[in-house]
Amino acid sequence: MSAGKKHFCQAYIGIGSNLDSPEAQVGQAIVELRQMSDCCLTAVSSLYRSAPMGRTDQGDFINAVAAIMTCLGPRQMLASLRTIEDRHGRDRTVERWGPRTLDLDLLIFDELKIVSSDLIVPHPRIAERNFVLLPLCELAPRLMIPGLGEVTTLARDVAQSGIRIEKIGPSTF
């Protein structure tokens, strides 16, 4: 590779919110993803409304997935995502699977498999989450998730779970 030439990787980001106008939170997050340095937002899925996981005594989530080409490394990408979450008032001290203003998950980063204390890629529960797999199928139906298989097959398998989800329309952001 020549000096100064950047190598771009494909990343997929899960986006979710169920507090403080969730559709607006997701929309603003998409705008902020589009503005990230060393990244190019290439596609955004439709918006989905899904039942919460874990704690069911909270509002439904609005979810989407964004495709990004980036020359950032996976940890740099994670740090950038956390910065966006922080701007939206994300509180990491609250319980797992509780309500949140914004959740940005690094789902897939190229063909990498990373397991460390601060980052796991592909996302460790990606194969269990219809609110990730269905929007991901829209963007890349033949995508192979490292170590797990084709996204369409995984989505078909998780569809049998009965977890409530509905497509609420295209992203307009």
Image (cartoon, rainbow, N blue to C red):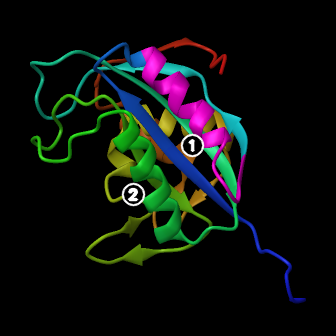
- Total count of labels: 2
Residue closer to the observer: 62 or 162:
62
On-image quarter of the N terminus: bottom right
Select label 1 or label 2 by which is in front.
2
Placement of 1 over or under 170, stated as above or below: below
Q: What span is in magenta?
A: 23-40
Q: Residue at x 61, y 31 (%)?
A: 31
Q: Position of residue 134 (x, y in %)?
A: 51, 32
Residue closer to the observer: 40 or 47:
40
Q: Quadrant of residue 33?
A: top right
Label 2: which secondary element:
loop
| Residue 166's disc number | none
Label 1: which secondary element:
helix
State the residue position of label 1: 152
Q: Residue furthest right?
A: 2
Relative to 141, is 168 on the left or the right?
left
Type of the residue with mark 1: Thr
Which is more N-terminal, label 2 or label 1? Answer: 2
Type of the residue with mark 2: His
Q: Position of residue 144 (x, y in %)?
A: 60, 59
Majority SS type along the magenta span: helix
Q: Position of residue 76 (x, y in %)?
A: 51, 67
Residue closer to the observer: 103 or 151:
103
Relative to 122, is 33 on the left or the right?
right
Q: Residue at x 46, y 70 (%)?
A: 75
Q: How many other residues sit within 10 Å of disc 1, few (<14), some (14-19) or many (≥20)?
A: some
Q: CA distance from mark 1 to mark 2?
A: 16 Å
Placement of 87 over or under 82, stated as above or below: above
| Residue 123's disc number | 2
Q: Quadrant of residue 25?
A: top left
